[in-house]
Image (tube, rainbow, N blue to C red):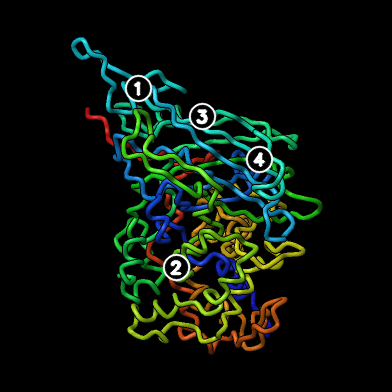
Amino acid sequence: MTLKPASLAKGCLLMAVASAAIASSHREAPFITTSPKVDGTDFYMFRSYEGVAADGTGGRSDYVTMIANYQPLQGPYGGPNYFSMDPNALYEIHIDNNGDAREDITFQFRFKNNLKGTPLSIGNTSVPIPLIQSGTVAAVNDASLNLAETYSLTVVRGDRRKGAAQVVAASLPKPVDYIGQKTLGDAAAYKAYADKHIHTVTIPGCAMPARVFVGQRQEGFAVNLGRIFDLVDAPAEVLLNPALKDAEGANGNHYIQKQNVTSLALEVHRSCLTAGGETVIGGWTTASLRQARLLNGAPPSGHQASEKAGGAWTQVSRLGNPLVNEVVIGLPDKDKFNASAPKDDGQFLAYVSNPTLPALLGQVLVGNPAGVAPTNLPRTDLLTTFLTGITGVNKPATVAPSEMLRLNTAVPPVPFANQNRLGVAGNALNTDPNKVNDNAGFPNGRRPKDDVVDIALVAMLGGLCVINGDNNALGLNGVPGVPSLVSACRPSSVPLGAQSANVHDAVDQAVVPFLPGFPYLNTPNPGSMKLQ
């Protein structure tokens, strides 16, 4: 089979998303819903595009930005305590730089909540106030903060528990959440305040300085969240018609853009993340809690003094590619996946080789599980890219099959204005001879602007097999290194046929506001607007 350029572009598009599986992880597993402070929601990893020229040079182009988001769906009005991080938790970003599915570099974040106990004199009695602020806030470590958060950053080389650990910074201040405009000013004032918390740090073993920011941000992920989980409450004719993708939300729902999230953003020179001649790195995030917790029925005065944690660190959250746990892993194994490591991902193979999501979509969209579900089982089209990365895009020279977000650090970044929301695939589809080439997006890492939802839906509904054709043009009828997994991935196995390339969730990632530079995610929504 000879593929035309447009077909090749679509092939890139569909292969890109098979490794991502739909979107972002919010409240994705039973246990994590009980511990929202350690719930990882999104992980972004990309070549920094702050200040870069159209050719991908200049500015911060030689750096890689990693953003790990936690604490989903923060109502900005959520006072009086708002959304401090858990001092009894360990938050981590892991990097595999040799393809063996094991962490080689880990960045660890630990938090401390410092309570002043600010009092007011009421009569002849000094009484602590009930709020986390006693007045307006504008400066780092502002005297008006009754509760001040700090965090430490440590780098571990080798095994995250047994490797060589070195402290990068022992106590960095974190900005208070955007309580409201009376406390912290308008959006411009809050941005100026938050920017004071962008810290330059030196990572041991790295010759180039890094930057780190931890703080509240506006939720940057666009997804029709309510409708999707309400049995996909939208007509099939809407979801299969790209012309009905509505940026204003008439067909979609941008509710979560009204919410906030807490970001752990780290920008590191790419030479400090790669090893040898391998330019592809894999990344994922985790959060861990102590194995034991004692609750005190008569706690002392203080902040979060009702529990005493101890024992070994126990992983309770994991996130690499988006929404794998949320819509691919079955309900009985969601907590297990959150506690697992990439090197052990073979135990979840059936969820990818025989996914339930396409059948569920058929049931709720057309009343027939077979109505849209591809018939090529096992789904080698998904397994190939899900386990190894994509040849020529983000597959390491040698790779152990595993789930993680992979980035080829040799591909130059693209300025935000020129980014294609469909990343590598959108670049191939763009025939404008004057275009700025964009091969720096999903699945080559993930940038905030990349619309992973639409691309992943296309892959789930069989678009890969339409492009693979009857002659196995893309080599998707098997999985490299796993000879027992063979299927007939061809157009006849896709009930939707060419329509599988049209599916979308009715909202547009490209219209979400972001910052032009680090930490990239937008200033958070305020808890209240100042009365005029």
Which of pointers 1 and 4 indicates the residue nearer the eye?
A: 1
The answer for how far apart the CA atoms under marks 3 and 1 are is: 23 Å
**Residue under numbered circle 3:** 197
Does 254 sit above or below residue 63? below
N-term mark: 3 or 2? 3
N-term mark: 2 or 4? 4
Q: Where is residue 351 drawn, in percent x and y?
A: 52, 74
Determine contact: label 3, label 4, CB under 8 Å: no
Q: Where is residue 191 drawn, in percent x and y?
A: 44, 32
Residue 514 lies left or right of residue 398; in this view the side is: left
N-term mark: 3 or 1? 1
Determine contact: label 3, label 1, CB under 8 Å: no
Q: Which label is found at residue 117?
A: 1
N-term mark: 1 or 4? 1
The answer for how far apart the CA atoms under marks 3 and 4 are is: 20 Å
Residue 369's image quarter? bottom left
Does 430 sit above or below residue 482? above
The answer for how far apart the CA atoms under marks 1 and 4 are is: 33 Å
Which of pointers 2 and 4 indicates the residue nearer the eye?
A: 4
What secondary structure is marked by label 4?
Answer: strand
Q: Amino acid at mark 3?
A: His
351 or 140, nearer to the observer: 351
Does 47 sit above or below residue 380? above
**Residue under numbered circle 4:** 155
Residue 397's image quarter? bottom right
Q: Amino acid at mark 2?
A: Val
